[in-house]
Image (cartoon, helix red, strand yellow):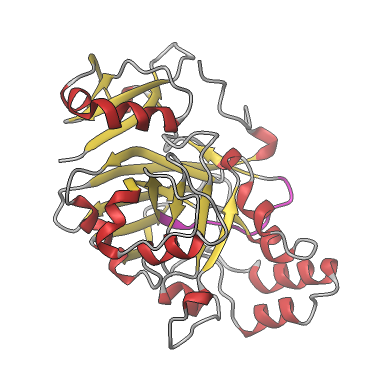
Amino acid sequence: MGLSIIRYRQPGSDQATWGRLEKGLVYALPWEDRELRGVLEHLAQRRAAAADGGTPTGLSLAEVELLSPLTPASTLLCQGLNYASHQQEAGMHKAAIDPQDNLLFIKSSASLTGADNDIIRPTGCELLDYEAELGLVIGKPIVAPTDVPRDALGDYVAGFIACNDVSARDQQLGGPAMQWFRGKSYRTFCPAGPVLYLLDDGEIDYVDRLNVKLWVNGELRQSASTAQLLHKPHDTLGFASRFANLHPGDCLLTGTPGGVALNMNLKTGLAVLLNMRNDARRLAKLRAAQGGSPDYLRDGDVVELEICSEDGQISLGRQRNRVVPESVADDLQEPPAG
């Protein structure tokens, strides 16, 4: 079995700590690294010791403040339209898969937040959406064009993590010249964790056997298997290596299945396409076309996300995030660790 790594604070402490989760209990690990990259280096050298080690805290997962295992230096490389069901609701379905259609974009690490933290809706955001995604944490540098065969994927991927690619559709599609980076990167727009599952030998094959589910207020909105990924992770890493560097601790978010709030129907599509040169009109038309949907997130909504293997051997834990408006948020940033 692999290692379930968490990053957390104990009650009454502002110190971020790395830990190991076993049978629901937290064992503190002795590393003081602020970045995930350093932790992966420790594990590469002393994995066996970490597997059985750590100081018992006597605390359960519910008794600590969970932080994102992904850290500020982590690059978040994201895939879009990587499930046929999401392509269809986005109005972009294609019968054949072309490697050049692999949609990649960057999400700021400033968006990272813990698995139980609030999602802060920015002032003026009316179309707040959710996207459940499997994240693949990089374990080996990719700093040149690299062919990644399917049977070598485990050489480059250290582990799995659950992520929610929260999106402000107002900015992504309605902002000046359309603003994917801004619309995807507001603070708290990437709940990650609770668990970073570091893979044991042979477990990389589970990349095709994970169930991805998301609920809003108890209603199941998204449910899919990673077997349905259109552009497979090994192909994506090889494709991305032509124009991007990836380092240990970086993360590939592999795309979201169908079931998001955005529905690129004819009315919405025309609102975007016919107003490409008029930002204000495009935003107004987009909101008019989508604003009536009950599926967009509202203040007070609770979003839950879970990823686990079909046979129950791997669980990435469960997220539970409440949506709050920026005007009442206590703090937009994760308090400094250390």
Furthest-bottom residue in view?
A: 95
Tell whether 326 sits left or right of 75. right
- The reply to whether the magenta stretch includes residue 265 is no
Q: Can see residue 101?
A: yes
Q: Is residue 131 magenta?
A: yes
The percent position of residue 138, horizontal first and vertical second, equals: 40, 46
Relative to 304, residue 238 above or below: below
Q: Position of residue 280 (x, y in %)?
A: 84, 66
The N terminus - image quarter: top left
Q: Quadrant of residue 278?
A: bottom right
Depth check: 218 or 116 in front? 116
Provide residue 206's location: percent of width, then percent of height: 22, 57
Q: Magenta residues, as a range?
A: 123-133
Instruction: Tell which of 325 and 175 is nearer to you.
Output: 175
Residue sitting at x 51%, y 57%: 78
From this viewpoint, is residue 119 visible? no
Residue at 66 percent of width and 77 percent of height: 268
The residue under the point 49% across, 48% down is: 246
